Structures are given as C-alpha cells and as structure tokens.
Amino acid sequence: MPINILGLNGSARVDGWTAALLDLILEHAAKAGARVERLDLVRHPFPFCVGNYSMEPSACGPNECTQGPWDGFGKIAERLFWADAVVFATPVYWYGPSARMKALIERMTSLENKGLLLAGKPMALAAVAEEDGAAHAMAQLATPLNYMGFSLIPMGSCKKLG
C-alpha cells in the first residue's frame, strides 16, 4: 500500500525556486510509489495564532481554536492528518523560514496541545536560499516540529542556493 506524502510550500510564489525543489522531491517520491500532494500555503490563508495556549490551554485544540478550523488552516490540518510523511519547504528570508511557514508552525500548536496528534510522522525539510542561511532556517523548523512529535528522516534536509 503506498504511503501518502504531503509537501508544504511555504513560499508566496507557487512557481518559484522553493516550489521547484519541492516538486522535485515529490516527483522522486511518486516514482518510488508514494501518493503525493503539494499544498501551497499562500492558497490557504489563515490568521496568525493568537496565543490561546498561554492564557487558556483548553481553548487551544484542533476544534477549539478561536481562529478556526474553518479558515485555511482547517484544510492544511486535514491534509496533515492524511499524510504519512510531510515535506516542509521554505524560502529563506533573513536566515529564517518564511513568515507563512512560521505562522503555520504557530497554528500547529493546536495540533500538539491535545496529545501530540502528529507524533511519529516522518518529516523532511527543504530550504532555498539566495545566499546563506538555509541550515539555520531548517533548524528553526526542525526544533518545534520535533517537539510536536515529527521525526526528521535520515538525510531528510536539503538546501539549494538560488
């Protein structure tokens, strides 16, 4: 039975360098027999996390969040649950991940607050940098995602200088 791999494009450009690298990764996964899907965060807008967890943890969950799940994050969360593995792809802006990718990580707090709902999912990280900072950007993703229960696969990070 094929595995489901979700590729998340954190770039504002659906046809830019980050999307191209993500497509290459997903293409190779599909050739190996996986079912793949690419989701562009820019096509599923959602508001920033308002920090319910710090004030009232019971108001921070996939169905309790005052921000959704009816906004664009609901579709993203649905696909995260569908996926057996996830590729997080981001452009590098000032040595860090894109604001969209960072906002996604913050909204994903609602998925780890109720018992690490994504625990055990393998992940891969991809970053595209014009100059430098890709390793730093991927580390900024790896740390919170690992805390949420994702496992970075061996050789699961790649970077491309633009």
Image (cartoon, grey):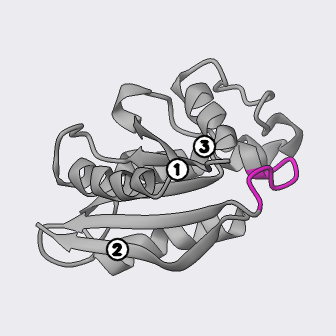
Q: Which residue is mark 1?
A: 34
Kindly state the secondary structure of the residue where label 3 is placed. helix
For marks 3 and 1, give the CA distance: 27 Å
Dominant SS of magenta comes to loop
In this view, which residue lies farthest toward the top?
70
Q: Nearer the viewer, mark 3 or mark 1?
A: 1
Q: Which residue is mark 2?
A: 158
Q: Is residue 141 above or below residue 58?
A: below
Residue occupying the point 19% across, 78% down: 132
Q: Is residue 147 magenta?
A: no
Q: Is residue 82 above or below residue 23?
A: above
The span shown in magenta is 112-119
Residue occupying the point 60% across, 35% down: 79
Total tally of numbered discs in the picture:
3
The three-letter amino acid code for the residue at tag 3 is Arg
The three-letter amino acid code for the residue at tag 1 is Ala
For marks 3 and 2, give the CA distance: 24 Å
Rendered location of residue 130, percent (x, y): 12, 68
For marks 1 and 2, give the CA distance: 19 Å
The three-letter amino acid code for the residue at tag 2 is Cys
* Mark positioned earlier in the residue sequence (3 or 2): 3
Q: Residues within 10 Å of mark 3 (few under 14, many from 20)?
A: many
Q: State which quadrant residue 96 falls in.
A: bottom left
For the C terminus, the quadrant is bottom left
* Mark positioned earlier in the residue sequence (3 or 1): 1
Left or right position of 78 against 58: left
Q: Which mark is residue 107?
A: 3
Kindly state the secondary structure of the residue where label 1 is placed. loop
